[in-house]
Image (tube, grey):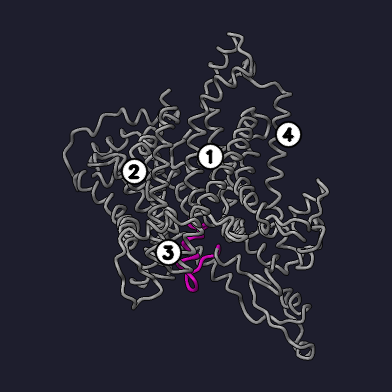
């Protein structure tokens, strides 16, 4: 966890904000007579409400989840006696084949969305950085899908994906000749995992693009000028200057997308609801079924704990790698 | 960069880059344009194959979005006084009459109330905390800041389990207040991190000067720092608003009636034999439009907002 913290502290390595540096260099408060409340009191008055709110609505529930995870509590049966079951919930989850299928579905979704978003996002950023006329306007247009409600947009994509009437199937038929009614993007076991990857890529490629663009713009021209004087080829400049300089930014983008897509719920639940069968049932969707449809509250609490331990664990390992790249 | 710099791309390169980017942008816009277009189609046009690009626009989708309708017999229809307004006319052409308003208006208002309520609260609390984190020595400051951020890493469904139980006990289930508090708790991490970044950029000298002039620390905060941070506060507010506006997981699990927001509602709009796509598209258009406007307004701070201030530029 601490490492994650570092990257955010060192976030300023990615900024060229001179003002921040200036602000930090100003000497700490000039000696003066205290009027009104002391700084110390103000600091606490200002921070306390936020901390209190987070304790009440984040930490207290979290502790409660951990507690419930050792019981067989069911939230829909209020009068039933609750029993402590020790680690049995955890044991059942970790040995459940179904859950490993969900994890595979999550991994498939995670890996492929990141691969496509990084490739397309970087390519777009690289092209936009050529600063053609109107590039700012087009950048804003490209960014639009990312800001929209995933549930509302995901729901509409089910319409675009309809086999008989959908726009996507029509376009596929138009360009490839494969009959539009012969395949169903969301209904087929082979295609559905890719259908959700496509929509997520459509939505979130701009995110990776924006971060890459910031990376590309942070490279000072004189480095390329020096390389040019040394007669380094464009190809060589790309691999020895552009890529290494953008890498920390790219990795940050991957971190954000990774965490978000590990938690993915709204978009995919609207698109496929986890189906067909449970082929696109990502971890969060599965968790929702266990907790709010089957009402296995104790069991799903253990599941929830396992999920965020996994997220924190993976994120920390990843950030360690990121910090290494940054330090180079 | 000067125009003669050797790193300036040639005009040929610029053309190719431009064409590729514009090509991508056009393709990426198609689903959005299709939403808007479908909102103005008749149900028959919406599901015709091949998909209709050119069609006679109608407001039927919008009428269906805002009303509930009942079928009446032709005799009853004959007996009615002539239709008032275009909505009644459209509905009657299908042999139906308007029975009353639909739930959409209510759900949309819920989104507005919960969105603005939680944004106001997040910004209010977030600005105070961010100022304190930016200017004062606070024990365990880094740990607290990280704690605030880490709350954002949990899957909403995982958090929703205990929140559901807690709200049931406290009677906060399906209430505006409950949703406002919940969205504030989720947004506060973003608000504190972004606002701390913005306040860090305001030189301390301004406040120091004010303090020497006899302002109290509190006066210095709201008379000197707040006006300087106005742009940052405004863009942070928009980010919080967009999050609350788009949120689905908590909304679908914790609200069902009184406090349900638009995202869980829009996908449930059904007509005869399945989803009423023009009405769904009309609802989606109205719901997405404010976010599109805000995105354009925000474009300069977009990067900062989506990375929690980690990338500023």
In the picture of the structure, the residue carrying the numbered disc 2 is: B146
The answer to which quarter of the image holds residue B269 is bottom right
State whether residue B101 appears in this view.
Answer: yes
Report the magenta residues as a range.
B244-263
Using residue A164 as the reference point, say whether residue B241 is left or right of it.
left
Q: Earlier in the sequence, mark 3 or mark 1?
A: 3
- Provide the chain ID for the residue under circle 4: B
Circle 1 is placed at which residue position? B300
Residue B19 image label: 4
Q: Considering the numbered disc 4 on the image, is that residue within a helix, a strand or a loop?
A: helix
Mark 2 to mark 4 CA distance (whole Å)? 43 Å
Q: Indicate yes or no whether the magenta region holds residue B251.
A: yes
Q: Nearer the viewer, residue B282 or B225?
A: B282
- Circle nearer the N terminus (4, 1): 4
Chain under disc 3: B
Image marks 2 and 3: residues in contact by CB distance under 8 Å: no
Choose top left, top right, bottom left or bottom right for residue A187: bottom right
| Residue B240 percent location from the top left of the image | 46, 52
In this view of the protein, which residue sits in the foreground, A132 or A2? A2
Q: Nearer the viewer, mark 4 or mark 1?
A: 4
Examine the rendering and report whether any part of residue A36 can be seen: no
Between circles 1 and 2, the one closer to the viewer is 2
Q: Can residue B212 be found in the magenta stretch?
A: no
Disc number placed over residue A151 in the picture, else none: none
């Amino acid at each position: 966890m601490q490492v994650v913290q570092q990257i955010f502290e060192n976030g300023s390595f990615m900024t060229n904000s001179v003002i921040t540096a200036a602000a930090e260099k100003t000497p700490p408060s000039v000696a003066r007579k205290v009027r009104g409340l002391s700084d110390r009191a103000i600091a606490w008055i200002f921070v306390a409400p936020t901390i209190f709110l987070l304790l009440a609505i984040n930490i207290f529930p979290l502790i409660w989840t951990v507690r419930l995870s050792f019981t067989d509590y069911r939230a829909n049966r209020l009068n039933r006696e609750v029993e402590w079951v020790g680690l049995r919930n955890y044991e059942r989850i970790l040995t459940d084949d179904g859950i490993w299928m969900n994890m595979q579905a999550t991994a498939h979704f995670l890996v492929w969305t990141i691969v496509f978003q990084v490739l397309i996002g970087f390519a777009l950023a690289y092209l936009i950085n050529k600063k053609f006329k109107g590039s700012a306007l087009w950048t804003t247009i490209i960014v639009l899908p990312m800001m929209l409600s995933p549930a509302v947009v995901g729901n509409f994509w089910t319409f675009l994906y309809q086999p008989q009437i959908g726009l996507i199937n029509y376009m596929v038929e138009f360009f490839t000749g494969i009959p539009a009614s012969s395949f169903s993007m969301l209904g087929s076991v082979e295609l559905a995992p890719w259908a959700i990857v496509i929509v997520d890529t459509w939505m979130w490629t701009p995110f990776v693009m924006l971060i890459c663009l910031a990376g590309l713009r942070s490279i000072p021209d004189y480095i390329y000028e020096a390389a040019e004087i040394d007669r380094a080829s464009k190809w060589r400049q790309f691999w020895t200057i552009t890529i290494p300089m953008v890498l920390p930014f790219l990795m940050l983008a991957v971190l954000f997308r990774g965490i978000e897509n590990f938690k993915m719920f709204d978009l995919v639940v609207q698109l496929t609801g986890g189906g067909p069968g449970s082929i696109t049932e990502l971890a969060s969707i599965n968790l929702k079924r266990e907790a709010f449809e089957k009402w296995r509250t104790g069991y799903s609490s253990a599941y929830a704990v396992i999920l965020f331990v996994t997220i924190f664990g993976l994120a920390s390992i990843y950030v360690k790698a990121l910090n290494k790249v940054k330090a180079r | 960069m000067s125009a003669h710099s050797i790193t300036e791309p040639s005009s040929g390169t610029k053309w190719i880059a431009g064409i590729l980017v514009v090509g991508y942008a056009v393709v990426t816009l198609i689903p959005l344009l299709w939403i808007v277009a479908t909102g103005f189609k008749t149900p028959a046009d919406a599901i015709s194959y091949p998909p209709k690009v050119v069609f006679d626009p109608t407001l039927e989708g919008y009428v269906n979005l805002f009303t509930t309708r009942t079928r009446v017999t032709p005799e009853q229809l004959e007996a009615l006084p002539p239709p008032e307004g275009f909505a009644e006319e459209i509905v009657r052409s299908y042999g139906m009459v308007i029975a009353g308003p639909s739930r959409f208006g209510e759900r949309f208002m819920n989104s507005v109330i919960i969105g603005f309520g939680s944004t106001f609260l997040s910004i209010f609390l977030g600005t105070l905390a961010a100022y304190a984190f930016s200017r004062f020595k606070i024990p365990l400051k880094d740990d607290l800041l990280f704690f605030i951020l880490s709350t954002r890493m949990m899957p909403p469904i995982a958090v929703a389990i205990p929140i559901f139980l807690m709200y049931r006990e406290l009677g906060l289930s399906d209430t505006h207040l409950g949703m406002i508090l919940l969205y504030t708790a989720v947004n506060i991490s973003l608000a504190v991190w972004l606002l701390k970044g913005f306040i860090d950029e305001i030189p301390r000298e301004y406040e120091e000067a004010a303090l020497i002039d006899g302002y109290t620390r509190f006066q210095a905060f709201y008379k000197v720092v707040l006006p300087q941070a106005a742009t940052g506060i405004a863009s942070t507010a928009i980010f919080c608003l967009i999050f609350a506006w788009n949120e689905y997981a908590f909304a679908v699990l914790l609200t069902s009636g009184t406090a349900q927001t638009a995202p869980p509602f829009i996908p449930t709009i059904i007509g005869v034999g399945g989803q009423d796509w023009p009405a769904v598209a009309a609802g989606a258009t109205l719901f997405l439009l404010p976010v599109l406007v805000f995105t354009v307004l925000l474009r300069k701070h977009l990067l900062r907002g989506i990375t929690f201030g980690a990338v500023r530029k």
